[in-house]
Image: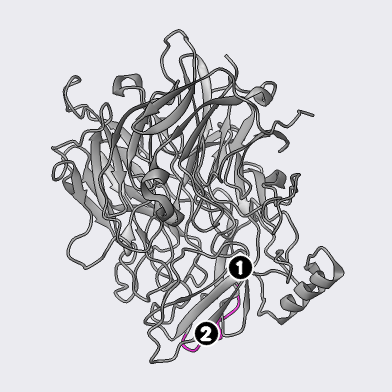
């Protein structure tokens, strides 16, 4: 068994002051070789979250140490405003021709370029966003593309694209961060017009995708609080000029609804000219009387022609969504190699814990999809779908069956209290519609899987996925006709928190929270967060293990780890060294797992939680693992502005 490292004292530091911020970098002098590594948010355009770098492996990962630390300066600049941020950015490494910088964005959409070996800042771009609105600030990443129509030595031959909180699409020169003046108006395209929306109504979080001269971008929209939200229209532009090319509204023909937006990362198959959209739920999330029918292209994976926006195929994994089961994760593109057959494939994770696998060119399922009968709704005028799709394999990644006999607790007293709560619930299994009676929501709106997605082990067909495993409850509360209703300023409830938000324009308010004992402990058995290895080719679970320690989640911090798993946001990456790196948990850890069995081989305590997906690259002969640590507004566990890089001793 490998020893597990906690904090490893780094060697030989030198310190830089850059733009008023201290950064620490390991001093070295190494031969110059080409940079290799992470050019896209998900490792590649298909979101595999896999790196062929293998310098760090099972045998030496416990020697990892801090190579450098960079602080963006957001804490110093914004202070307590940081409580309304989620630090989710995954850096990318630019190719040598574009400057070979490590580039990422802060929650306030500042783009920062660093030296990959030292962490020293090279340049920054600040779009000075309009910070109005209540939505938390977040930026998952930026995208890179080379414009071959521009001379090799001219400005903006190499470009970075980013969608901002105030709903603009920027293009900047990847070598110096200056806006590309020929793109849109002085470097930016405004993505909405005179609809009266403010940034809190509609904004951006995930990076756009760029391929074959086209840049495609989705949106985030305000959740829960209104019956009719902004349309989730996906837009495409010429990557050189910013000229509009096409747009796709997933809810054409549904004028009284909104959303179905694409807030999760998009994938693109450039060779076949296809772009894949993971669409969210239609509004209002928990009440569907005014949006009869299945919701057209909401809660779907949609394949569009990259050049024209024409739909090629789609699959809807939730019909007439009443649970906020958005499509949360980037579609994963891979080659299905089985029985001598090779098929271009797509795997889509859902909040319900399902993994649907398709031929990505035709939409044909590679595992049969069955129809699961589901309960009807008791709400007047509500017509819940009579069945929901379910793949015969792989199995659901969480066990959503929870009855009074399954109640968990530290003592017979709190276990009995949980059993009593479960006995009183409206609980008819997965897809139980909310009612005026308190109902089980398992999984809740966090999932299951969420936007961190999964990591595919090269072409093995094995997918590693981090999963939330906490039961929630919900109830529809009749709203008096004369009540104005004020919504809480939050996204989703975290473990231990209940929220009540209006669905203005409907007869109801929704109350949602975790199902827990009087001790504040979830009523379902741990692990409350876990890592699952699922074989897409055999349709089986290879192993699973707890993800996260609860030692900091009680009223008193325990002096040792208690590996019962925690709710988690963020994703992980796999490497050729046989490792899976992930933060995501509510315990300030970044961990390395053995991909073969889930053993923890290394972990390090960060200053704050890392609710972002890490990345890795090799530069000047040395492999680095980098993770953004800044906390998450929803977990209320502190904030920061740290970017940590780890490497083996020189």
Secondary structure of residue under mark 2: strand
Expressed as whole percent of the image width and height from the top left, the position of residue 271 reads: 36, 34
Q: Nearer the viewer, residue 455 or 31?
A: 31
- Identified at 49% across, 13% down, the residue is 28
Tell me where residue 559 sits by quadrant.
top right
- Is 261 situated left or right of 521 in this image? left
- Identified at 45% across, 58% down, the residue is 315
Expressed as whole percent of the image width and height from the top left, the position of residue 197 reads: 25, 66
The mark found on residue 372 in the picture is: 1
- Identified at 14% across, 42% down, the residue is 186
Mark 1 vs 2, N-terminal side: 1
Residue at the disc numbered 2: 477
Q: Is residue 262 above or below residue 584?
A: below
Expressed as whole percent of the image width and height from the top left, the position of residue 247 reads: 25, 55
Q: Nearer the viewer, mark 1 or mark 2?
A: 2
Tell me where residue 437 sits by quadrant.
bottom right
């Amino acid at each position: 068994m490998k020893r597990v490292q906690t904090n490893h004292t780094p060697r030989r530091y030198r310190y830089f002051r850059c733009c008023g911020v201290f950064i620490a970098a390991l001093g070295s002098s190494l031969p110059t070789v080409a940079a290799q590594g992470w050019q896209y948010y998900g490792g590649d355009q298909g979101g595999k979250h896999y790196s062929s770098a293998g310098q760090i492996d099972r045998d030496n990962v416990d020697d990892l140490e801090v190579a450098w630390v960079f602080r963006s300066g957001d804490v110093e600049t914004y202070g307590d405003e940081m409580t309304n941020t989620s630090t989710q950015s995954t850096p990318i490494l630019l190719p040598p021709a574009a400057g070979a910088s490590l580039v990422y964005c802060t929650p306030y959409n500042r783009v920062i370029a660093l030296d990959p070996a030292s962490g020293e800042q090279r340049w920054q771009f600040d779009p000075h966003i309009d910070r109005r609105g209540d939505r938390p600030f977040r930026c998952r990443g930026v995208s890179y593309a080379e414009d071959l129509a521009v001379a090799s030595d001219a400005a903006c031959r190499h470009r970075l694209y980013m969608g901002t909180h105030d709903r603009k699409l920027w293009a900047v020169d990847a070598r110096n961060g200056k806006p590309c003046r020929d793109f849109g108006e002085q470097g930016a395209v405004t993505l909405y017009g005179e609809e009266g929306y403010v940034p809190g109504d509609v904004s951006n979080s995930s990076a756009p995708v760029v391929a074959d001269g086209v840049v495609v971008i989705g949106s985030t929209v305000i959740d829960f609080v209104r019956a009719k939200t902004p349309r989730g229209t996906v837009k495409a532009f010429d990557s050189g000029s910013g000229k509009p090319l096409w747009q796709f509204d997933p809810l054409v023909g549904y004028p009284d609804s909104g959303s179905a937006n694409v807030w999760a990362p998009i994938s693109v198959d450039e060779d076949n000219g296809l772009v894949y959209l993971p669409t969210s739920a239609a509004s209002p999330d928990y009440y569907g009387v005014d949006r009869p029918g299945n919701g057209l292209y909401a809660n779907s994976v949609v394949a569009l022609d990259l050049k024209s926006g024409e739909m090629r195929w789609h699959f809807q994994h939730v019909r007439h969504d009443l649970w906020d089961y958005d499509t949360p994760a980037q579609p994963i593109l891979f080659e299905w190699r089985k029985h001598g057959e090779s098929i271009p494939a797509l795997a889509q994770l859902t909040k319900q814990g399902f993994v649907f696998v398709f031929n990505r060119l035709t939409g044909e399922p590679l595992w049969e999809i069955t129809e699961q009968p589901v309960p009807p709704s008791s709400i007047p005028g509500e017509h819940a779908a009579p069945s929901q799709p379910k793949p015969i394999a792989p199995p659901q990644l969480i066990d959503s069956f929870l009855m009074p006999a399954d109640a968990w607790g530290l003592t017979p007293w709190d276990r009995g209290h949980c059993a009593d709560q479960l006995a009183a619930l409206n609980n008819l299994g997965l897809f139980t519609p909310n009612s005026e009676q308190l109902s089980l929501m398992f999984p809740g709106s966090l999932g299951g899987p969420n936007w961190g997605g999964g990591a595919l082990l090269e072409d093995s067909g094995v997918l590693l996925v981090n999963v939330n495993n906490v039961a929630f409850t919900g109830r529809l509360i009749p709203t008096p006709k004369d009540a104005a209703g004020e919504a809480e300023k939050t996204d989703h409830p975290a473990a231990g928190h209940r929220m009540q938000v209006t669905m203005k324009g409907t007869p109801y308010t929704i109350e949602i929270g975790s199902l827990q004992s009087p001790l504040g402990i979830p009523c379902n058995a741990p692990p409350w967060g876990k890592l699952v290895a699922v074989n897409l080719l055999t349709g089986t679970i290879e192993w699973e293990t707890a993800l996260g320690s609860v030692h900091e989640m009680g009223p008193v911090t325990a002096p040792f780890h208690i590996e019962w798993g925690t709710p988690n946001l963020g994703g992980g990456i796999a490497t050729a060294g046989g490792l899976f790196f992930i933060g995501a948990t509510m315990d300030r850890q970044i961990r390395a797992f053995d991909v073969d069995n889930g053993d923890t081989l290394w972990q390090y305590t960060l200053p704050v939680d890392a609710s972002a997906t890490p990345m890795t690259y090799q530069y000047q002969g040395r492999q680095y693992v980098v993770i953004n640590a800044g906390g998450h507004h929803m977990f209320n566990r502190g904030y920061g502005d740290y970017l940590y890089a780890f490497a083996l001793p020189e």
